[in-house]
Amino acid sequence: MRITGYRTLSTLHRWGRPIGDVNGYVESGKTVVPVVLLETDSGLTGVGLGSHTGLDTVFPALEGEDPRATTALYDRMLAWVFKSGHGGVTFGAIGAFDMALWDLKAKAAGQPLWRLLGARDHVVPGYASGLDGPLDDERLLQVQQEFADRGFRAVKLKGGLDIATDIRRLEAVRDLYADAAGGRVPSLMLDANESWSRKEAIRYLHRIEQRVPLAWVEEPVRRWDVEGHAHVVRAVDAAVATGENLTGLEQFRPLIQHAAVDIVQTGSVWGITHFLRVAALAHAFELPVSPVGYNANPLAHAAAAVPNHLATEVQDLGFPEGIRADQHFEDGHLVLGEAPGLGLEVDEAAIAGLGEQADWGLGTGPHVRPHRAGRRLISPEPHLFAPLANGVATTDGSPTL
């Protein structure tokens, strides 16, 4: 079996609500989902989800190769961009191809990927998320009720702008989950998405922890700030989770070596091989690993196979248009099916007929860092949380510390 080419498609995910975080939001609730289809001379096609940018640059490393040589081809793609670098969108392209390679390898073996990777079980612990930053309290509870009804007992909220708001939302969600579980208090997490300075993070979290215990705080400071993460690790009760935006195994090493992370995370769009290697590195230091969520939860197969997996983020209970995933949610877990590969079926005709636009909010989206991020320790202006006509709120205010 040899790789002969690739094709790209773009579908969309309908969230049914505005989504975002402390950095920005997507008011439409429709986001783009890039799909990569890796073709072979055997008739099998591998499915990868992730970036389209940079595919042309790294594809020559794969052309004509046997796709079953997954880890060797991953290293070959890294070597192909040795001088120009593999960070950012290039790493996303490598991750998309890598995902498609593993999908092909498992399809060729006639097995679901979780079994090919050596997992004993196909039931993967999860936690509820939702990208809920722009939601008002009523809509937040409606979304989280859907997760609670599926048996989830751990939940992560977006926050980081206003302590009073975050405490109110955390307490409300805690009570909702406790009611659904007969009084059992859920594990609560807060995701700040790199919005704080070191001292902002510590002061903010001390105030929250006086009222609401947190299982972990996610990305409290900039992704590369090893010393800052270590400060937060030592100063707060909550575990510190980070890593979803790190592109390459070498970026994790200083965080782990300097005890600057408690929960090692990886981004789903960076691929299967990256996750497996990060998980092995974390395991060597007795640290748990937790992949962040993405459309159709592709890393769940790999998560099932590593000994230190903690829980996989589930951002939504639905799937992108034109993509069927052989998985479902039960008792707070992702239950993976027996379909070969990643268990993803792509309906190209349905995707071609969509005719709708989707994005990440462009200049107001969560991928754009706000002007005041990391500089809100002293706030000369009042907190800005102005409601919009549709009930969504702006997110470039200043917290009360």
Image: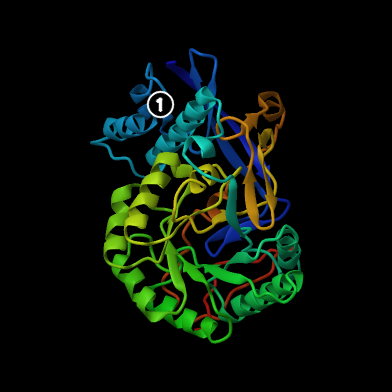
Residue 392 visible here: yes
Q: Dot 1 corresponds to which residue?
A: 56
Q: Where residue 213 sits in the image (x, y, percent)? A: 55, 79
The amino acid type, in three-letter code, at marker 1 is: Asp
- Of residue 74 and residue 201, the one placed in the foreground of this image is 74
Q: Residue 324 is drawn in which quadrant?
A: top right
- In the picture, measured across the screen, residue 49 lies left or right of residue 88, that is right
**205 w.r.t. 24: above or below:** below
- In the picture, measured across the screen, residue 281 lies left or right of residue 168, that is left
Count up the numbered dots: 1
Pointer 1 local density, CA inside 10 Å: few below 14, some 14–19, many at least 20:
few
Q: Residue 263 is drawn in which quadrant?
A: bottom left
Which residue, as the protein is rendered here, is positioned at the far left? 83
- Of residue 174 and residue 22, the one placed in the foreground of this image is 174
- Of residue 212 and residue 60, the one placed in the foreground of this image is 212
Q: Where residue 111 sits in the image (x, y, percent)? A: 55, 30
Residue at left offset 47%, top offset 27%: 105
Which residue, as the protein is rendered here, is positioned at the far bottom? 210
- Of residue 273 and residue 125, the one placed in the foreground of this image is 125
Q: SS at mark 1?
A: helix
Q: Where residue 12 sits in the image (x, y, percent)? A: 65, 39
Residue at left offset 57%, top offset 62%: 21
